Image (cartoon, rainbow, N blue to C red):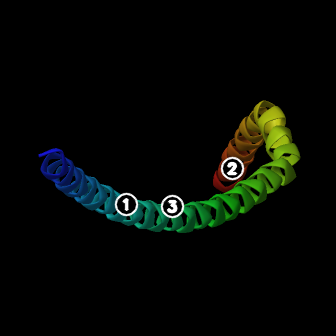
């Protein structure tokens, strides 16, 4: 009777062990699949990151070029802004002088 009970216990233990091994193997396979999936996702993200870094570097170069261009034209723009009023007054005086000369010449032609 004791041998029968021992054999039953051994069978039950063996069945339990096999179930646990199956569960562990399934879990191992799931974890391996998850690891592969994560590695693929990381590789994809790294490719996207590399592309973004290339875009960022190109954009930075464009920005640097724009800043250099702005710095190169700033003195001329500042001069035009500063001289605008003086030039406008000079042009008004010139127009008045030309109108006066035209009127003078028109009057001289009639006389």
Confirm or deny contact between disc 1 and disc 3 (CB under 8 A). no
Q: Secondary structure at mark 2?
A: helix
* Disc 3 target residue: 42
> Residue 49 location, x and y as percent?
57, 60
> Residue 3 location, x and y as percent?
19, 51
What residue lies at 72% left-to-right and 45% top-to-bottom?
Answer: 104
Q: Residues within 10 Å of mark 2 (few under 14, many from 20)?
A: few
What residue lies at 77% left-to-right and 55% top-to-bottom?
Answer: 64
* Disc 1 target residue: 28
Closer to the camera in the image, 38 or 74: 38
| For residue 8, side relative to residue 46 (left or right) | left
Closer to the camera in the image, 45 or 85: 45
> Residue 41 location, x and y as percent?
44, 62
Label 3 and label 2: CA atoms lie apart by 82 Å
Confirm or deny contact between disc 3 and disc 2 (CB under 8 A). no
Q: Is residue 44 above or below residue 3?
A: below
* Disc 2 target residue: 102
Circle nearer the N terminus (1, 2) = 1
State which mark lies toward you, 1 or 3.
Answer: 1
Closer to the camera in the image, 31 or 73: 31
Circle nearer the N terminus (1, 3) = 1
Q: Residues within 10 Å of mark 1 (few under 14, many from 20)?
A: few
| For residue 111, side relative to residue 36 (left or right) | right
Label 1 and label 3: CA atoms lie apart by 21 Å
Q: Quadrant of residue 46?
A: bottom right
């Amino acid at each position: 009777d004791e041998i029968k009970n021992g054999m039953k216990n051994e069978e039950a233990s063996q069945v339990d062990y096999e179930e646990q091994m199956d569960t562990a193997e399934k879990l191992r396979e799931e974890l391996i699949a998850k690891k592969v999936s994560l590695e693929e996702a990381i590789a994809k993200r790294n490719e996207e990151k590399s592309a973004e870094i290339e875009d960022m570097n190109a954009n930075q170069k464009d920005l640097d070029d724009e800043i250099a261009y702005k710095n190169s034209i700033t003195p001329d723009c500042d001069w035009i802004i500063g001289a605008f009023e003086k030039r406008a007054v000079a042009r008004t005086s010139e127009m008045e002088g030309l109108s006066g000369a035209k009127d003078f010449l028109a009057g001289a032609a009639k006389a």
